[in-house]
Image (tube, coloured by chain):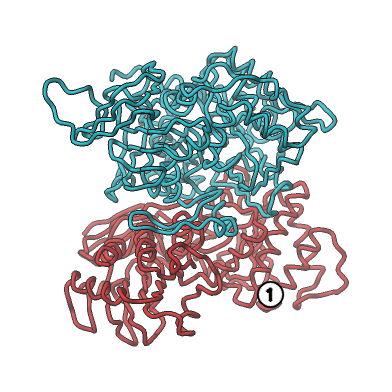
Amino acid sequence: MLIKLTGGAVYDPASGIDGAKQDIYIQDGRIVDKPSGDFQVDKEYDLKGKVVMSGAIDMHTHIGGGKGNIARTLLPEDHRADPVARTDITRSGCGHAMPSTFVTGYRYAEMGYTAGFEPAVLPINARQAHMEMADIPILDKGGYVLLGSDDYLLRMLTAKKDQKAINDYVAFTMQAAKAIGVKVVNPGGISAFKFNQRKLELDEQNSHYGVTPREILKSLATAVKELGITHPLHVHGCNLGVPGNMNTTLDTIQGIGGLPMHLTHIQFHSYGTEGDFKFSSGAAQIAEAVNKNKNITIDVGQILFGQTVTASGDNMRQHANHKHASPNKWVTMDIECDAGCGVVPFKYKDKNFVNALQWAIGLETFLLVDDPWRIFLTTDHPNGAPFTSYPHLIRLLMDRSFRNDVLSTIHPEAQKMTTLASIEREYSLQEIAIMTRAGAARLIGLQDRGGLSPGNWADITVYTDNADRQLMFEKPDYVFKDGELVVVDGKVIHTKWGTTHVVKPDFDASLEKDLQKYFDRFLTMKLGNFKISDDEITEDGRGSLTVHPLKGDVA
Amino acid sequence: MAEITEVPSPFCGIGTDDLTIQVDGVSLKVVENGCAVNSPAFEQAITDTRPRVDGKDVSLDAAVAKAAALLKNTNQPVIGGCATDVNGMRALLALADRSGAVVDNMNFTGARNNFLALQDSGWMNTTLAEVKNRCDLLLVVGIDLEGFSPRFFERYLWNKESMFMDDTAKREVIYLGKAPSGTASTSPDGQTALVFECANEDLPDVVAVLRALVKGNPIRVDSVGGIAVADLQGIADKLKAASYSVVTWAAGALAYSQAELTVQTISEMVKDINDRNTRSSGLPLGGKEGDQTANQVCGWTTGYPARTRFSSGYPEYDPFLNDANALLANGEADALVWVQAFNVKAVPPVTALPTIVIGRSGMTFAKEPDVFIPVGTPGIDHVGHAYRMDNVVAIRLKKLRESGLSSTSDVLNAIEQAL
């Protein structure tokens, strides 16, 4: 079947097209060149006056894994307020802060998203992450495997194993957990919490291992680079949420020595200690450092006001933050000599000084970082806000008068502590397309996604241009996934199953001998039972694996 | 005859995956690392291989068609048992969604003690590998741990080596409530567990006093539930002095009214210890025969644990009103689907309602159900996934033999399609 999308204004940063009127042809799931000679179009969509982008990609969203399911279980009252009934083609479920898997897929698709990446896949919990993501319809998905507080790596660092050995272990774990990236959360801090350390500075030693977060970051960032993994080490830094942590973040940027590094939900790591409340914005300094250091990418982790739930691997910081839990119930877990997690419900309030300033810090960050290819639109779903708030966030970025209207309603002391009112920048459609499409695909290393040139998979979103950008991005006219029309007028009309994106870096097989001994001595599972087989993703007939090349691979 | 090693068990809840099993045709024998729970569960013989309708052998298609016909015009079907693997639960929830059924895991009334506490105040918990490497004090509340899980001590406490302890035999074990039934809790050095017994119904008071003592609150009585307050003070002191204490309980063993308050007191006590400059964690026991699996899959599919109804077209959770037994007893249901792929003894409640059983081959009935479809067992007859007690770890179940029995998911998917 040949599909033609006729006359839309195409925003395709991957091929440098910025709003030009172009036709797009789709065949067998992919975008193709206009056929030569005589040809018959089987289905044509008239897109005059419409805006065409590739399907959006959320490069950091907690959509799969144990902590998300704890968050769900913890908040039945939140689900009750947003029940989702089944239809002839969709399953029932629940929405709001931490939606059920099926509803996650539908609601992302209904906003024009066609892929989401779970950023905190614990190796020992990777099966669950993939099983949950396997029940998210329509979207493509993938995960970043979490290392850095696992005892095996910390033992290697204490034993001063060479970089090659670290690389082998990272590659093994990526394969075993079916990952496309590597994440580190509060490097070494999750382990330190198990030894009763309650904070861990960048140069502070884990009391048992004598290893510092800085050393862990260096070794993992080096491994990711040397293995040729496209996605840079994905870093949730030290001291999340602590006033003054901007200095830790600046130090982290300097300390990585030019290695590629992605700093995630940087809003939570951009706090100063000025002012009457000893809490201030560090966004300007952080943005300046990001602008200057081309090896650094960030996503924001914008907070938006309302009820949500925070779910993180950082049990050290989540334990410290539990006093802000709203409603007052929370969970932390120490997990399998591997990692941990903490789940704390939050209600961000515009009349609360700290929350109001967090909101402004996130927006300042978006507006002060120059290069849209190195900054990504996230709320760290659900930690800053549920992903369903993205259209509102896009309007805040694209519409200065709307932004200033909202600013004028927040806590007055927070208004005084932010430069937001004076920032004139408004994001363009092309810049939004970079942040949510082309840039994200490039950052993760997705082949044939995130662009609209021939050869790409036909993940395409069509919007009606509207000065109210929230309305525009809430309700696409059409969404195509792999060439199949799945959404019309913001409603799912057809469902399908996306693929799971992975990389498969090589490692020296002799590593497994030592790992096997380690598993037998100290862990609770046989090494052979730990590794996730390809079958586990594909055997139900719905899932598939897409392996992406490493840097240096010949395509 | 073949021998399969490193076999994981879905039966014991603690995720043992070191079993060696001899396969001779369709009969299995656990030849290494068996235990009183796992060996009989693996060795259970296959009896029925043919589905039955009204007691007569029929084809699978005919049984599926009959099941669909029985469900077709119901107003409130109930799906009980819910004891199967991840794919089985996926299919079960799809069927429930389509038929507007109530889904109720057979162990939910016990698990409810945990869910109510979790959903009211939360907890700080740990997993088995952390216990194996860190635990220096294990407090066992209200359960005979080795009866529950015969290999717990061997695998997770008396392990020869640990990463963070020089000598695991120096670990201390304290029983509060129930006494151990055997000697598994005795350390390799011969150190026996401290045991403070009390009646089940005194546990709420005993645990409340222990928490008060941990917090340093004064207690005006000398004993509670027959246990000297001085002894409880000793436990409190040990909990505060330990580097990484672990407090374990089994929600289902706290079989008295409002036992969720006991779970809550234990969990809040663990939080209190963590505010006193040391670490402590809870460890809820469970995970047998798919109960964690049911709650996990229902959790991500609906947002709620596995006592959820679909009769309004969307999931509604109620840990009391959606109790299958109550619905049957009150005449609020008009059909029963019983799904139990692990345990032939876990038969459906007897009811006059149309009854469809998707059960492990070998199940026998006091009253023949309208439809019986024998299915294979996850981890024996087909591959699958099951959650361990600590909820974080899903184990990959192996296929050990070629029995020809269908999987739960195949059967339930077929019934859903037929609807």
Vertical arrangement, residue B173 with respect to residue B136, above or below: below
Q: Is residue A159 visible?
A: no
- Quadrant showing the C terminus of chain B: bottom left
Q: Residue A409 at x, y = what percent?
A: 72, 37
Q: Amino acid at mark 1?
A: Glu
Vertical arrangement, residue B218 with respect to residue B273, above or below: below
- In this rendering, would A470 be left or right of A266? left
Q: Could you say which is closer to the camera, residue A392 or residue A349?
A: A392
Q: Which chain is red?
A: B
Q: Residue A390 at x, y = what percent?
A: 53, 37
- In this rendering, would A415 be left or right of A63? right
Residue beneath the point at 49% across and 62% down:
B151
- Classify 10 Å Cα crowding around label 1: few (below 14), some (14-19), many (20 and above): some
Q: How many numbered badges does the structure rendering display? A: 1
- In this rendering, would B369 be left or right of A381? left
Residue beneath the point at 22% across and 64% down:
B403
Q: Is residue A345 visible?
A: yes
Q: Which residue is mark 1?
A: B197
- The secondary structure type at the circle numbered 1 is strand
